[in-house]
Each structure stands twice: as structure tokens, then as C-alpha cells.
């Protein structure tokens, strides 16, 4: 049924009146992470959807926001924190879908005695600045009564590093624990220099949902192309959800060039499953938690109901008969 629906949708798209070629080239910003891979896979099937996707990989979501401000990107895959911070700073974007859930672990050194968040008192904890992991770490420390800062003097000293550097810091014993993304968290555990303390999903945020964001200009002025892209997004994501072998091969071989193993992939995706949906309520809760802990330095926090627009997603799922 799903394949038949895809065929019908593609036939319908092919029958549409041809638009300007420039409009059919979609500039996509993405991150090189296992749970972002279904978004990356869109470019592999884009010709079947009547579009061409020009993908650029960035170091972090805030860099994608900067590219959107500069008019270099039409659509971006980011954690919700980056999207919220961007919108608060006036980046003209809409959240149009979610594409993965979870994707965070508190990982301690294997030789440490850290068993809970409370055990982080007096420790050095690494995290990537401007990431959803930073938001989750702040929320976990806060609800456990621990203070933190990126200098000595508080209960916990925060060390800001990139995702790859976090693992190196843990391995080199330069930090005691890290709040890490996937697949790097799974790699630290599987290679034996890290142990899982917890998955930080007991805050008001719950499992954080990664966001697919679209510029307001693209959403409003290139509607037909936006619809094609969303059909492709749903098709790519559905493929990864239904066919784990395709997802695994793409992530381990195409995306990471053999640098992560099958076990790393399995563990990573078990903690960050691919998905479609997102709600304004989830984004509002995330915004409220960020504001409470001073993350993003928002003077005017955006109201989620104003900029979470899931109509394109709903339409695409209906066309492809995806629940």
C-alpha cells in the first residue's frame, strides 16, 4: 500500500506544471549524526520526487541558523534548542516536522563512581554548547539541586566541547562525564571508556524531538516545491523506519564511511528513533525550560503556536497513506 501510494504521489508530482529550475533545487542544511541520516537520505531519492537537494553539513544547529539568516539554506535539520534560539533572535523560520526523538545520554568515565546526576557534584562535565544536550543537562542539574558554570566555583564545572571532542576528553580523563549525542554516546560505551549513567528524559521536555525547519520565504513563496520536499521527507523517513538494513548501510557506510559499527548504529538508533511528528506543546515546553535555565539568552521567547506549522507534513502523510 505504501509503495503504491508513493507511486501515485510521484506520478502526480510529475504531472504538475514545470516550475523554474532554481525553485526545484532545495538547499538543505544538516548535521552528521546517526539520527539525522533520514534527512540526509532525502537527496538519494530526490529525483524520484521531482526535486534536487543540495545538502551542506554543519558542525552544529546554530550554524544552520546563521546560514538561513544569510539566505544560503532553505531547509535545515536541527535540535529544537537551535531552532528556538534562532527564532528568538529573529530568524524567519517555521518548524514543519520532527525527525527523531531522544538522542542523548549522560555518560561517565568507566573508572568513575558516578551512578546518578547527584554524583556529578564536584565534577567536570562536558557538553556541546548550543545543543539540546546542554538544555537537558541544565534541566537535570536544576531538578537535582546542583549549580553549574563554565568556571570553577559552582557544584558542577561545565566544559564546552564539540561532539567528537567530548569523547576524546572522556577517554583522556579530562572530564568526569559528558552529556553526549548519538552515535558518539554509544561509541564511548561500546569502546569501554564510558558507562551510561542515564538517558535524560525525566525532565519536563521528556524525549526531545529534533526539528525540520523551513524558511518562511520558502514555505510561503515556493509552496509546490515545499510540498515535493515534504513528500520526499516522509518517504525517506518511512523507509528508514521500515527497513533497518537500508538505514544501517547508509549510516555506517555512506555517512560515516565505516567509522561506526553495526553495534554503534543499533545502540544509537535505539536511543534516537526516526520519527515524523512534532507538536507546538513540545516546543513550548522546551522553550520554557530554556528560559528557566538561561539558555539561548532569549529576551523575547517565541510562542510555539506562532511558528510550528505542520500542515505540509499532515498533507504529505495523507498523500502517502502514512499514519
Image (cartoon, grey):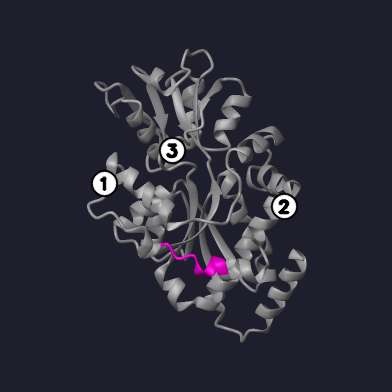
- Which residue is disc 1 drawn over? 297
Q: Quadrant of residue 34?
A: top right
Residue 140 lies in magenta, yes or no?
Answer: no
Can the viewer see residue 52 in this picture? no
Give how far apart the Cα atoms at labels 2 and 3 are. Answer: 28 Å
Q: Circle 2: is it few (<14), some (14-19), or many (20+) Cα within 10 Å?
A: few
Q: Which residues are magenta?
A: 308-314
Circle 3 residues within 10 Å: few <14, some 14–19, many ≥20: many
The residue that disc 3 covers is: 133
Q: Position of residue 63 (x, y in %)?
A: 41, 51
Q: Secondary structure at mark 2?
A: helix
- Pointer 1 local density, CA inside 10 Å: few below 14, some 14–19, many at least 20: few
Q: What SS does tag 1 mark?
A: loop
Q: Earlier in the sequence, mark 1 or mark 3?
A: 3
Residue 84, placed above or below residue 179: below
In this rendered view, identify the residue nearer to me: 243 or 140. Answer: 140
CB of mark 2 within 8 Å of CB of mark 1?
no
Location of the N terminus (image quadrant): bottom right
Residue behind mark 2: 242
Please state which of residues 300 and 91 is positioned toward the viewer in this rendering. Answer: 300
Earlier-in-chain disc, 2 versus 3:
3
Amino acid at each position: 500500500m505504501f509503495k503504491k501510494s508513493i507511486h501515485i504521489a510521484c506520478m502526480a508530482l510529475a504531472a504538475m506544471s514545470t516550475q523554474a529550475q532554481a525553485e526545484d533545487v532545495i538547499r538543505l542544511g544538516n548535521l552528521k549524526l546517526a539520527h539525522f541520516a533520514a534527512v540526509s537520505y532525502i537527496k538519494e531519492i530526490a529525483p524520484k520526487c521531482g526535486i534536487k537537494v543540495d545538502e551542506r553539513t554543519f558542525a552544529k544547529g546554530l550554524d544552520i541558523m546563521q546560514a538561513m539568516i544569510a539566505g544560503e539554506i532553505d531547509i535545515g535539520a536541527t535540535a529544537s534548542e537551535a531552532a528556538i534560539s534562532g527564532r528568538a533572535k529573529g530568524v524567519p523560520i517555521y518548524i514543519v516536522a520532527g525527525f527523531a526523538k531522544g538522542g542523548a545520554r549522560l555518560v561517565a568515565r568507566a573508572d568513575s563512581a558516578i551512578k546518578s546526576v547527584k554524583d556529578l557534584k564536584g565534577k567536570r562535565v562536558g557538553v556541546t554548547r548550543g545543543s539540546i544536550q546542554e538544555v537537558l543537562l541544565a534541566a537535570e542539574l536544576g531538578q537535582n539541586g546542583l549549580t553549574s558554570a563554565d568556571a570553577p566555583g559552582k557544584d558542577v564545572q561545565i566544559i564546552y566541547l564539540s561532539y567528537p571532542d567530548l569523547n576524546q576528553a572522556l577517554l583522556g580523563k579530562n572530564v568526569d562525564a559528558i552529556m553526549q549525542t548519538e552515535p558518539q554516546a554509544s561509541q564511548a560505551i561500546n569502546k569501554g571508556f564510558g558507562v551510561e549513567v542515564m538517558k535524560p528524559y525525566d525532565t519536563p521536555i521528556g524525549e526531545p524531538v529534533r526539528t525540520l525547519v523551513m524558511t518562511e520565504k520558502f514555505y510561503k513563496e515556493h509552496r509546490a516545491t515545499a510540498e515535493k520536499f515534504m513528500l520526499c521527507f516522509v518517504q525517506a523517513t518511512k523507509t528508514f523506519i521500515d527497513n533497518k538494513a537500508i538505514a544501517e548501510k547508509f549510516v555506517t557506510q555512506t555517512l560515516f564511511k565505516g567509522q561506526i559499527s553495526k553495534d554503534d548504529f543499533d545502540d544509537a538508533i535505539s536511543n534516537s528513533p526516526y520519527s515524523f511528528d512534532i507538536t507546538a506543546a513540545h516546543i513550548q515546553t522546551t522553550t520554557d525550560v530554556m528560559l528557566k535555565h538561561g539558555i539561548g539568552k532569549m529576551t523575547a521567547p517565541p510562542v510555539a503556536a506562532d511558528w510550528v506549522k505542520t500542515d505540509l507534513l499532515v498533507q504529505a502523510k495523507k498523500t502517502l497513506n502514512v499514519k
